[in-house]
């Protein structure tokens, strides 16, 4: 909820990744948290589950790729998930592996739901 309550701090976190043009940082900081919240609520309520899973999976893949690219470039970042003041992630193989596995999960689960087989 911090991302919704403090969009300015979240915008700083997005800017620290150095992947988004500066004119789009504030727009992303306003739209992304609300799309996460709305998609999560729809998924929990069982309304438009395929669409909600696709949005959540897409955001997870986007986030994982952003972390991988930023770590490969050697930029110390905090993920920005819970607060804006976090310990920066170092460019370690462990972080890259975790990000890669999150990316794979982000592709796997929406595909399973879209195929009509939500049980895992």
Image (cartoon, rainbow, N blue to C red):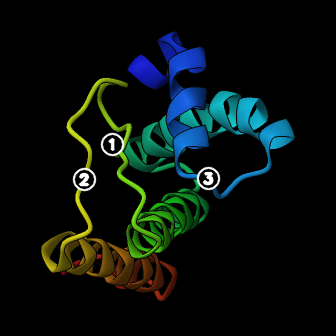
Quarter occupied by the N terminus: top left
Dot 1 lies on which element? loop
Q: Name the residue under label 2.
A: 89
Q: Position of residue 79 (x, y in %)?
A: 35, 46
Looking at the image, residue 114 sits to the left or right of residue 104; the answer is: right
Residue that sits furthest to the left in the current view: 94
Q: Mark 1 points at which residue?
A: 78
Residue in the image at 58% along x and 55% along y: 48
Local crowd at mark 3 within 10 Å, few (<14), some, or many (≥20)? some
Looking at the image, residue 10 sits to the left or right of residue 106; the answer is: right
* 69 vs 116: above or below: above
Dots 3 and 1: beta carbons under 8 Å?
no
* 61 vs 5: above or below: below
User: Is residue 1 at all visible to an observer of this figure?
Assistant: no
Q: In which quarter of the image is residue 78?
A: top left
Q: Position of residue 105 (x, y in %)?
A: 31, 77
Q: Name the residue under label 3.
A: 18
User: Is residue 103 at all visible to an observer of this figure?
Assistant: yes
Looking at the image, residue 28 sits to the left or right of residue 57; the answer is: right
Residue that sits furthest to the front in the current view: 74
Toward the viewer: 114 or 102? 102
């Amino acid at each position: 909820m911090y991302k919704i309550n403090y969009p300015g701090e979240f915008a700083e976190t997005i800017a620290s990744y150095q992947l988004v043009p500066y004119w789009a940082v504030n727009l992303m900081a306003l739209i992304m948290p609300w799309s996460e919240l709305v998609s999560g609520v729809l998924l929990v309520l069982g309304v438009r589950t395929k669409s909600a899973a696709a949005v959540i999976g897409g955001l997870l893949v986007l986030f994982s790729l952003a972390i991988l690219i930023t770590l490969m470039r050697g930029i110390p970042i905090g993920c920005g998930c819970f607060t804006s003041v976090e310990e920066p992630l170092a460019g370690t193989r462990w972080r890259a592996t975790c990000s890669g596995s999150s990316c794979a999960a982000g592709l796997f689960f929406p595909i399973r739901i879209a195929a009509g087989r939500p049980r895992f």
